[in-house]
Amino acid sequence: MNGKHKIGTVGPLLGSFRCHTAAEYGGMFMVQLLTTLGAYRREELGLILPHEHVFVDLRTPDHPGHGEADSADVVRLMGPQIEAIKAQGVTALVECSTGGVGLRVDIDLAVSQATGMPIVVPTGIYREPWVPDWAAEASVEALEAWMVGELTQGVRDTGVQAAWIKVSAGDEGITPLETRILRAAARASARTGAIIGSHTIKESVVLDQLDIIADEGGSASRFISIHTQEEKDFGLHREVFARGAWLEFDHIGRVADAEVLALVMRALEAGAGRASALEPRQGLVRPGATRRWHAATLYASGR
């Protein structure tokens, strides 16, 4: 990370992911970001890396050994990467692996405990064909209850509460199964205040997702469209942030800085009133492969 892309800090992120509410403090309002190392107040955090994969398995869940890894091996590989970003001022990161692509909150917790780096973890399910069998067979109500449980009680036996909901949708349109998962996510978001982030390549599909969320009583202001830069029709970008949703431009560092700057400025000049751009050095662990690259994220919203 060279610092020249770093034009935002923690403010928008603390407003985006699930925080403790006033009701949880007997009516006293307190904004705290939920992480693997507990809850943090705004003033305790600075730069946050908003799109990371500490561990991910992009094989489908039916693949033998899917999502299996030894925590110590991941700590050994990721520890030096995290120490390097800590030295550059990073105070927390967001895990974007979700159900179906190897989310391992126990591994995130082990990495956090070994490095002192707070990690924000999600609940949720990825898109087809990565949807686990149990989720494919579950009702909207069952999926909603599961997500709310992870957001309010914790993920499995880790003692770590999920702070947001990560989903996805197919490139050519959201399928009935993905719709069921999104309906559950929208209901869980409405109940807990958790934001939904979706790996969705086409903004026309994002608009369909926003319709589904609204139908379930959710809010576009609690939705992040991830990988917005992959949609080349800027008119669709405008439609999405006009609805009040957040746009995420990421993978910065894979193209020339001038292209990145053009995306950021175009969004801002079009009226995306809130923006935070961050440039992490993004690392991930995948069974059988390891990749590292520079990346950055712009969050922008019309409201």
Image (cartoon, rainbow, N blue to C red):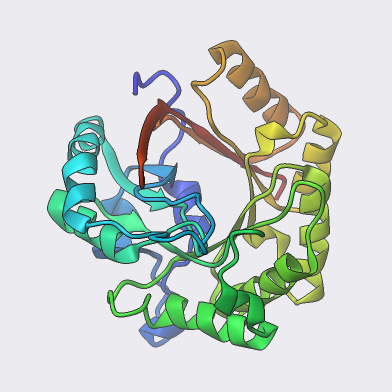
Answer with left or right where residue 78 lies relative to residue 180: left
The residue at the point 73 percent across, 52 percent down is 170
Vertical placement of residue 164 versus 2, above or below: below
- Comparing 215 with 156, the one in front is 156
Answer with left or right where residue 218 lies relative to residue 226: right
Q: Position of residue 66 (x, y in %)?
A: 42, 59
Q: Quadrant of residue 136?
A: bottom right
Q: Position of residue 222 (x, y in %)?
A: 63, 61
The residue at the point 24 percent across, 35 percent down is 81
- Considering the image in quadrants, where does the N terminus appear? top left
Can residue 284 be seen here? The reply is no
Answer with left or right where residue 153 lies relative to residue 221: left
Q: Position of residue 274 (x, y in %)?
A: 61, 42
Vertical placement of residue 290 versus 110, above or below: above
The residue at the point 80 percent across, 31 percent down is 234
Answer with left or right where residue 150 lies relative to residue 160: right
The residue at the point 68 percent across, 82 percent down is 140
Can residue 229 be seen here? The reply is yes
Q: Quadrant of residue 24?
A: bottom left
Q: Position of residue 103 (x, y in %)?
A: 42, 60
